[in-house]
Image (spheres, rainbow, N blue to C red):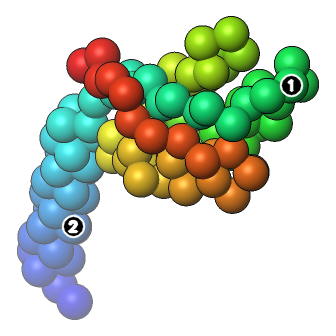
């Protein structure tokens, strides 16, 4: 390859890499943290929230969860580009605690 062609090829690769990087930033900017509340009526014992919390925190994209035994609810903050409500309810169901959506904070 002569120097001119090699230089043009290098510039093309750099430009393409910048475009791909910017596209990734754009996609990441569209992802937003969401907070939802799930009703979990089968939490009958004070230790149940521990199991529910562990199950929810294993879902990719979940950043925070608070489980309230008295209300029998869990409030979860997650990245909506990585997971969704169906995955959250599936996770609690698989842990032995079926849940349903009761509220969306954002």
Name the front one of labels 2 and 1. Answer: 1
Q: Position of residue 47 (x, y in %)?
A: 89, 25
- Determine whether, in the image, residue 23 is placed left or right of residue 97: left
Between residues 12 and 1, which one lies in front from this camera angle? Answer: 12
The relative height of residue 49 versus residue 18 in the rendered view (above or below) is above
Q: Is residue 46 above or below residue 48?
A: above
Residue placed at 59% from the left, 33% from the top?
Answer: 40
Place of residue 84 in the rendered image (x, y in percent of width and height, measured from the top left): 38, 47
The residue that disc 1 covers is 45
Q: Residues within 10 Å of mark 1 (few under 14, many from 20)?
A: few
Q: Nearer the viewer, residue 12 or 42?
A: 42
| 83 lies left or right of 48 | left
Q: Residue visible at 74% across and 51% down? A: 96
Q: Quadrant of residue 45?
A: top right
The C terminus - image quarter? top left
Quarter of the rendering containing residue 5: bottom left
Label 1 sits on a secondary structure element that is loop
Dot 2 and dot 1 residues touching (CB under 8 Å): no
Residue under label 2, please give it. 13
Nearer the N terminus, badge 2 or badge 1? 2
From mark 2 to mark 1, how far is it between C-alphas?
59 Å
- Residue ranking furthest to the bottom: 1
Answer whether residue 75 is visible to the viewer in this image.
yes
**Residue drawn at (86%, 19%) of the image:** 46
- Residue 91 on image: x %, y %: 62, 51
Q: Is residue 91 above or below residue 66?
A: below
Q: Quadrant of the N terminus?
A: bottom left
Q: Is residue 76 visible?
A: no
Q: Which mark is residue 14?
A: none
Question: Taking 15 as reference, is 98 left or right?
Answer: right
């Amino acid at each position: 390859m002569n120097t001119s062609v090699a230089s043009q090829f290098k510039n093309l690769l750099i430009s393409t890499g910048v475009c791909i990087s910017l596209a990734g930033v754009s996609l990441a900017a569209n992802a937003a943290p969401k907070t939802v509340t799930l009703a979990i009526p089968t939490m009958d014992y004070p230790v149940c929230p521990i199991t529910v919390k562990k199950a929810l925190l294993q879902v990719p994209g979940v950043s925070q969860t608070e489980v309230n035994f008295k209300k029998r609810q869990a409030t979860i903050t997650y990245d909506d580009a990585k997971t969704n409500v169906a995955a959250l309810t599936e996770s609690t169901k698989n842990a032995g605690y079926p849940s349903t959506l009761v509220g969306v904070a954002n």
